[in-house]
Structures are given as structure tokens and as C-alpha cells.
Image (spheres, rainbow, N blue to C red):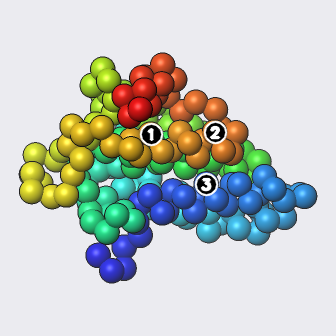
Amino acid sequence: KANEAADDGQCGRILGAYREHQMSPDDAFLRKNWPNIKRAIQYLIAKDGNDDGIIEGDQPNTLDASWFGKISFLASLYLAALRAGQAMAAEVGDTAFSVRCKTIADKGAQSILELFNGEYFIQIEDPNRKTAVAVRDGCYIDQIFGQTWAHWVGLGHLFDPDKQKTALQSLW
């Protein structure tokens, strides 16, 4: 949809804002931009109808299609954005929002493991959207891309590092 944000891009801009803040000499950038950064995170949280750390429904992305179902690529980016939101909210004193981001990210760290098939992370299709563009059970190169961002900005492991390593070995 022309006027809808790409979920992966939305996560990337949140993470990019966190990176810019980390590179700033003080907290002026974060304080100035926090209301809009928070709104961007709230947009994603609203798409996670049950706060399980995985976005539901229509998931437009920069690959020019909407994907549907549980998608590790987008879920990992969402988890990274939530962890960045948690950190930024704590820094500006928005304790309630920091706790909200943490709670959803903690749940997401478990929910994303449902997508691990023993070798790599897959997409669980929305049964009502079987004809939509999808990775399905393929070994997708961006399956844990959010973890890359998390390492770039010092957020640590978003979820089980052993399963991540196995997934990356499967790609190799």
C-alpha cells in the first residue's frame, strides 16, 4: 500500500535513531527526537495485537510486498527495535514505556523460537493468505537480520544465541 510504512524500514529507522544517539556527544538528539521515535515504536506495537513480540496481519516491507504470518526476518527486527526503545525510553525517564518495550521483547524472545525448525528460522504462513508472497519453510538470508542490528548498537543477543548460530551455519 502506497501510504503504509514498510515494517523492516520502520524498525531500521528506530534502530538508526538509537545509533545516532549513541554517536552524539550528549542526549540532546535523543530528547529532541524521542516523541517521534516513541510514536514509531508505538506504531509497530499496535501491529502486534497480542504483545507476543511478533507482528500480525499485513506486514509490508522493503521487498515491495506484504507478507503475512509469523516471519522471523521481521520479528527479529521488531525485537531489536523494542530493545532499542527500551534503552532510549529508560534514558529519557519514560519508565512505563521502557517496561512495556521490555515486556514485549522478553515475550518475543520466546515467541520467535516457535519459528526455529531445528536448522534455521522459517515463516509460519497465515493460513488465510496461502497465495501471498512468502518465504515459508525456506532458509532465508535475512532470517535473523534484527540480531545484526542488535550487535551493531550494543543490544546483545535478542534470543537464543545457539539457535542463531545454527541458523547462520545453515545459511553457510
Quadrant the N terminus occupies: bottom left
Where does the C terminus fall, quadrant-wise?
A: top left
**Residue toward you, 125 or 27:** 125
Q: Secondary structure at mark 2?
A: helix
Check disc 3 and report the residue beneath it: 15
Q: Residue at x 55, y 49 (%)?
A: 81
User: Residue at horizontal 64%, vertical 59%?
Assistant: 16
Kindly identify which numbered label has been placed on residue 144.
Answer: 1
* Amino acid on which disc 3 is placed: Leu
Residue that mark 2 sits on: 151
* SS type, badge 3: helix
Q: Amino acid at mark 2?
A: His
Q: Quadrant of residue 59?
A: bottom left
Q: Position of residue 35 (x, y in %)?
A: 65, 66
Disc 2 to disc 1, C-alpha distance = 12 Å
Q: Which mark is residue 25?
A: none
Q: Residue 140 in the image: state x and y as whole percent.
A: 33, 43
| Residue type marked 1 | Ile
- Say whether marks 1 and 3 touch (CB < 8 Å): no
Vertical placement of 161 versus 154: above or below? above
x, y (%) of residue 21?
A: 77, 57
View extreme (bottom): residue: 2
Mark 1 surroundings: few (<14), some (14-19) or many (≥20) residues within 10 A: many
Q: Residue at x 41, y 60 (%)?
A: 7
Q: Who is closer to the viewer here, 108 or 125?
A: 125
Please tell me which of labels 2 and 1 falls first in the chain: 1
Gap in Å between the C-alphas at discs 2 and 3? 11 Å
Residues at discs 2 and 1 in contact (Cβ within 8 Å): no
> Picture coordinates of residue 55 (x, y %)?
35, 49
